[in-house]
Amino acid sequence: MKDFAEGCVLVTCKAGKASFITAFTPDDLDLQIFNQDFYSCAFPKNLSKGTQSSVFAFTVGSMTAYTWSFQYGSNVDSIIILSSLPYPHLFLNLLSEVSQNCPANDTNFDEDTRFNLVVSFINSWKLQAEGKVLYSSIEASGYFGLSNFGYSSIDPYHYFGKDTDYTKIWKSLLLNQGVAVIGDDKSSICQGVFSLLGLFEPFKFNGEYLITNNPKDSRLFDTSKKYSIVGILTNNFNASKYKRKFGICLQIDTKTGQELDTVIIHKKQKLLYDLMETISNRNLETDPYHELLSRRLVTDDIDTVMCPQMKKKTLTFSELRIFETTRLVSEWMNGRTYRPELRESFLSNTPSEIVEKIETKDLPLALSAVNSIKAMFPNDSHFQSVMRKHRRLIEDRLGQINRRSSDSEL
C-alpha cells in the first residue's frame, strides 16, 4: 500500500453518538491527525436524508482523503483512503466501483468486508517503469499510464459553466491569488478542485488546497495558511465573505460547460512552460552560476525580448515577475538545476571571466556548488578539469579576501 497511500481507515458514526475509528492500516498510522475537522468531513449530512451511499474527497493536512460513505443498518460508515499522490481517479474510480457492487445495507457485505476489499485492491497495485501502474479493481485490470488518473484527466468544463473566464482563473492560480469552488454536491466540488489543479500541468503543483464540507472547519479561519484553491459546500459558504480572500469564486455548473474553453488554456500553459524553459536556459548561456546563486529568473531585458503576442498568449512581464516568486516556480527550478545545459554552460564560458563576475558575498555558495557539481560527473575528465579551474579561482578570491581581512585587523 505504501507506494500509493499513507493509509486506509474505517470510521463509524452511530446514530446520536460520536464517530470513532473501527479499523485502520498500516498498524503505525498516526491516528492523531484525525481531529474534529476530519470527523465532520467524513460523514456527509445528505446520507441521513435518503441518500445511502456517496463517494467524494476532502483534505487532511497534505493528504487527500478519498471517501466512500454508506448507510449500514442504523450506522453510517466511511471507508477513507489517505494519499498524497496527484492521481485522484486511482482512488475515486476504485471506491465508485466497489460502492456500485456492494450496495448500502447489503448484509452480504458488512463494514469490515468492504474495508478489507478496498485495502486488498490497493495492496495489489504495482508501480511500473515509465510512469505506469499495474492496476486492478472490480471492473478493470492491466497496465495503465498514471497520467490517466491524474488531475489533467479531469476537464474543468464538466464542472463550470459556459461563461466561465478560464484565462482569468488560470492567471489567478498561477499568481497565487486564490480560487474558491462552491457547490451543493461534494463529489462535484472535489472533482472541480482537481480539474483546476490539472491546469498547472506540465508544471507540478506543489501548493496547498483545501476541500471541506464543514462551515466551521478551523482551517477556513487559519490566517497563517494561504490555499491556492478551496472547495466547500454552497450552503455552508458565504461567497461575499470570502471574495476578499480569494481572487475568484466559482459556482459548480455541470450542465453548460464548453470544451474549447479549456483546450485553449492547456495550450497557453504549455506555451508558458516552454517560455520559462527558454528563459531559464537563456540565462545559462552567459552565466553557469545564474541559478546556482538564486539570481532572478526573469531578468529586466525579458520585457523587451518578449513579443507582444507572446505576452498576450501567456503572461505580461509584470505577471512573469510575480509568477517567478511562487512556490510552484521555485520548486520547478530546484528540480531542474542540474541539467545538460548547466554542464554546457560551464564548458562554453571562460572560467576566469565567469568567476570574476561573482559577487563577494556569493563566493562561498559558488564554491559549495562547484564541489557538488564536480562530484556528479566523476568520469568526465574534461568537465573535471574545467571545474578544478573554477574551484581554484574561487578559492584564490576567497584567500585574497581573508588575507585583506587579516591585514586590517593588525
Image (spheres, helix red, strand yellow):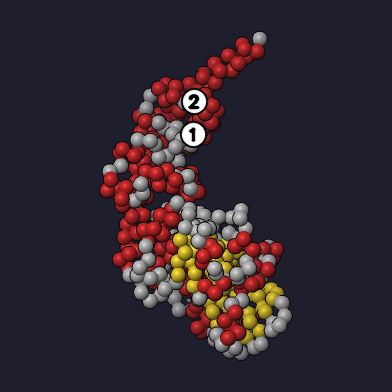
Q: Position of residue 391 (x, y in %)?
A: 49, 25
Q: Viewed as shown, does residue 46 lie left or right of 93?
A: right
Task: Give the total of numbered labels.
Answer: 2
Which image quadrant for residue 28? Answer: bottom right
Which image quadrant for residue 109? Answer: bottom right
Reply above or below: 44 against 359. Answer: below
Question: Local crowd at mark 2 within 10 Å, few (<14), some, or many (≥20)?
Answer: few
Give the residue drawn at x 32%, y 57%. 267
Q: Amino acid at mark 2?
A: Glu
In the rendered structure, are the residues bearing label 2 and label 1 in contact, judged by CB atoms less than 8 Å apart? no
Disc 2 versus disc 1: distance between alpha carbons?
10 Å
Is label 1 in a helix, a strand or a loop?
Answer: loop
Which image quadrant for residue 104? Answer: bottom right
Give the residue drawn at x 55%, y 85%. 51
Q: Amino acid at mark 1?
A: Leu
Q: Which residue is mark 1?
A: 293
Q: Which mark is residue 359?
A: 2
Give the residue drawn at x 65%, y 13%. 409
Is label 2 in a helix, a strand or a loop?
Answer: loop
Between 19 and 168, the one nearer to me in the picture: 168
